[in-house]
Each structure stands twice: as structure tokens, then as C-alpha cells.
Amino acid sequence: MTTVAMKPPVPAAGRVPKKKSSPGGGIGRYLLIRFLLIFPTIFILVSMVFWLMRTTGDPITAALGGKLGPDQLAVLIHEAGYDRPIIIQYFEYLGQVFTGNFGTTISTNRPVSEVLLTYGSATAELVFYALIVAFIVGIPLGMVAAYWRDKAPDAFLRVFAILCYATPVFFAGLLLKLVFAVWLKALPVAGRATVGSELQMQFLPDKTGIYLIDAIKTGDPAVLGDVLLHAVLPALALGLLTAGVFLRLVRTNVIGTLGTDYVNAARSRGVNEFRLVSKHAYRPALIPIITVIGLQVALLLGGAVLTETTFEWKGLGFMLIEFIKARDFVAVQGIVALLAVIVALSNFIVDIIAALIDPRVRY
């Protein structure tokens, strides 16, 4: 009996076998695309801000019209270059923005970049506190709601979540001030710190503008406690807005994870329901939370405008309202453009984290 040697299969003419793409290439391509999308996003947002602001005319007339005579207005408009064609002003504005020059405020005659640096740290600190509140409240309560699914605690928490993200943030802030500052007199009603604490932080040689860090640098526990007490009510008002979203997401995803095969296998081995929720179904349910953080940052920045105004928390949101009142559209353009950049970068960072922890996130 003769043995016939089998020849390897010959690929069809003109057809080249495809190589399997490596996971590293997939994530690299995904992150590259997400990074490149930042630039058109920022370009579109900055352009929209410019054209919407100019629908009311030039910034000089908007801010000082009625306060100065026509001849004085004409001189200022010419000196600022607002009498040139609008398309030239647009391209000049784009060039300034992409070099970090946002112009000079009309009402206070300060560089807009200086305003952004001075008050941006306060807004960043408030958003940080609000995210902590959202995580502390939303994630554990979402797990509790999933554990007591379709029972009284679950129904109560679902109503609580709806109230959190449906209640206007300024109304929540006023209620918190009424209860904890006016009735109970337990927390400060407004501001970031008392005058004494601000003076101590003001004389620090390397102050950051973030009161939490500056209070720690003073080495005085009383200053740190004062700063934290002032942050409680603003953080609650803004953080509960996002906590409601997190609660619903965690509840839904934990319930979905509890029905998977590996959880059913653990249940068949006698693992109790509490351990299934807290150990087996907990981590997979956090992936959607990470993916929506970028969107929530945009929501928090929008809510910070009303929160800072309600609590006189002097950040970008507070100053944005002040500049709108003064009709200082140069400052408004700069603040809104910076917020657009922050939102775009936040979404990119979230995309990186999501791609690293979830292998399904690929192009």
C-alpha cells in the first residue's frame, strides 16, 4: 500500500491570505481615531461660539452701547478691529484661540487667559467634589436597588434617582441651603471659605487656587475643615444630579449581569445573592459608568454655572454669568471655548480608560 503525500492547499489566484489583526493594533487604531476627532470637535464648538456671539453685533457695542457716544464707540471698535469683515475676524479669532490667546475682557480689561486660570481651578475643584458625591451615592445605592429588585427599597431608590437628575440644580441648591444653612445652621450658606481662611491661603508663596490643596499647605486643620464645610452643599447639589444617573446605570447593569451564565454557575454552587451582587456582578456593571463619565463631565460643567451662582462659588460658571450681565462677549467666548476643550479632552481620556478595561471597545 503506497502512501500519497498530501500537498498543502494553494491559495486562489490573486487572493492573499489575511493576517489576523493583533489586539494592540486594534486599540491603537481606535485611540488614534478618537484623538484625531478632538480637533474637528473643538473647531466646530469654537466656531459655533464665535458666530452665535456675533449675531448681536460687535462686542464693543454690545458691552458699551448706550454708555458711550457714537464717536467714542467708533474709535474703540476701530482700535479692536471689529470694523473689519467678519470672516477676517473669524480666522484671526481661530488663530488666537489655537495659540492660547482668548483676547482681553471689555468690562474688566483683563486677559481672558488670566481669568480662565484664576477661576478655572475653582470650577475644577467643584466638579471633583461633585464626582465624589456621585460615586459615593450612586454606585452603592444602585447595587442596593439591584439586590432588592422589584421590592420596596428598589422602588424608593428608583424614585430617588429620578428626583436627583430631574430636579433643577439651582432648586436643589436652594433647598439644601434652606435646610442645612438656615434651619439647622449646620453648614455655611455660601462662598468657598471664610475671610480668615482665604487670607491665610492668599499669603501662601506657591498657592494653586484649589482651596483643598492650599488649605493642606497652610498646615492648619481649622482652615482645612472650613474649606471642606463650605464645599459640602455645592458638592451635594451638583453631585446628586449625576448620582441619579449612576444609580440607574448600576442597577440596570447589575441586574443584567446577574442573569449571565457565570453568575448562574456561582449561584448553583450555593453562593448567596449578596455575594453575587457585591463580588461577581459589581465590576462588569462599572464599565458603562466609565463610558458615560465623559458625558457627565459636560453635564457637571453646565450645572456648575447654576451651582456656583447659587452658592457664590467664584469659579468659571459664576464669572460667566457676571460677564453675560455685563454683555462682555469676549470673555464669554473665551470661557465657553475653554469648557468645550475640557469636554472634548475629558471624553478622550474616558475613551482611553474604556478601551483599556473593556476589550470589546474597538473599531
Image (spheres, rainbow, N blue to C red):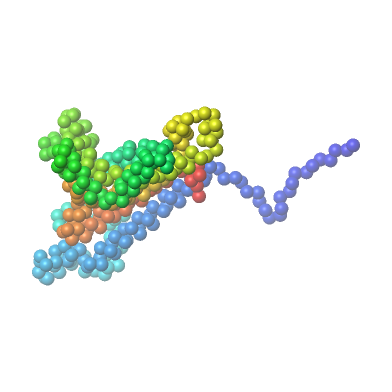
Residue 285 lies, in percent from the top left, at: 44, 40
Question: In the image, is 347 to the left or to the right of 315?
Answer: right
Q: Residue 228: name its quadrant.
A: top left
Which quadrant of the rendered structure holds the N terminus?
top right
Q: How many marks?
A: 0
Residue 335: tell me if it is visible.
yes
Residue 297: tell me if it is visible.
no
Q: Residue at x 55, y 38 (%)?
A: 261
Question: In the image, is 257 to the left or to the right of 314?
Answer: right
Q: Nearer the viewer, residue 357 or 234?
A: 234
Residue farthest along the front direction in this orientation: 152
Q: Nearer the viewer, residue 288 or 335?
A: 288
Q: Residue 134: name its quadrant.
A: top left
Q: Residue 176: name its quadrant.
A: top left
Q: Nearer the viewer, residue 175 or 153?
A: 153
Q: Residue at x 25, y 53 (%)?
A: 335
Question: In the image, is 279 to the left or to the right of 208?
Answer: right
Q: Is residue 47 above or below residue 144?
A: below
Q: Residue at x 46, y 41 (%)?
A: 255
Q: Is residue 106 above or below residue 214?
A: below
Q: Nearer the viewer, residue 42 or 322?
A: 322
Residue 196 lies, in percent from the top left, at: 11, 36
Residue 349 lies, in percent from the top left, at: 39, 45
Residue 145 lies, in percent from the top left, at: 39, 40
Q: Is residue 346 above or below residue 42?
A: above
Q: Residue at x 16, y 31 (%)?
A: 222
